Image (tube, grey):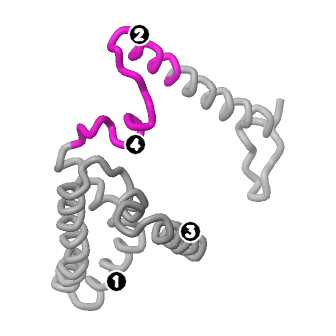
Amino acid sequence: MSSPATAAGVAAPLAQGAGYGVIIGIGALFAFGMWAIAVLLAKFQNEVQGSEMFMTAKRSIGTGLVASAVVSGWTIAATLLTSSSWTYSYGVSGAYYYGAGASVQIFVFAVGAIELKRRAPSAHTFLEISRIRYGRAGHWVQIGYSTLLQIIN
């Protein structure tokens, strides 16, 4: 059985329906596996997988993992390309200056996060903090601005 050729002239290894079947089948298998793990954890470890567990991992994430998540979230393709451009333009010191300038934001965010965790240890999101601090009206203003930012960005 021969596969239809694509626009580039390369034959597709699977038919389109078979490709969707593989993707949906693997997704269903993964979903079933995660469901089974949740059931086993609840039965043998008395560990219920609720929204608290999902959002905060029972607050068991260490500082090192949080720091690596912040840095990896910051180090996106645009950052890598920009630092390469600075290195090309200004030499090795260009990459250093770019990284040193950008690390200020990471430092300020880390200090702010530590202070927020100290003042509101049970809060999960900035929206919870803004509702406590600014009331219902401020909470809705932040929801509106956050939604608008996500649409624009």
Residue 22 screen position, x and y as percent? 67, 30
> Of the residues under marks 2 and 4, which one precedes in the sequence?
2
Q: Which residues are magenta?
A: 34-61
Residue type at tag 3: Thr
Residue 31 appears left or right of 40: right
Residue 47 screen position, x and y as percent? 36, 20
Residue shown at the point (17%, 49%) measured from the top left:
64
Residue type at tag 1: Ser
Asked if marks 2 and 1 touch (Cβ < 8 Å), the reply is no
> Of the residues under marks 3 and 4, which one precedes in the sequence?
4
The N terminus: image quadrant: top right
Residue 55, numbered circle: 4
Residue 116 appears in which quarter of the rendering? bottom left
Cα separation between marks 3 and 4: 20 Å
Q: From the viewer's perspective, is the residue at label 4 or at label 1 nearer?
A: 4
Cα separation between marks 4 and 1: 37 Å
Residue 43, numbered circle: 2
Asked if marks 2 and 4 touch (Cβ < 8 Å), the reply is no
Residue 50 screen position, x and y as percent? 44, 31
* Residue labelled with disc 1: 85
Residue 147, numbered circle: 3
> Of the residues under marks 3 and 1, which one precedes in the sequence?
1
**Residue placed most toward the observer, 142 or 131:** 131
Question: Considering the numbered disc 2 on the image, is that residue within a helix, a strand or a loop?
Answer: helix
Residue 84 screen position, x and y as percent? 32, 78
Cα separation between marks 3 and 2: 39 Å
Callout 1: few (<14), some (14-19), or many (20+) C-alpha neighbours within 10 Å?
some
Cα separation between marks 3 and 1: 33 Å
Q: Which residue extends farthest bottom?
A: 90
Cα separation between marks 2 and 1: 54 Å
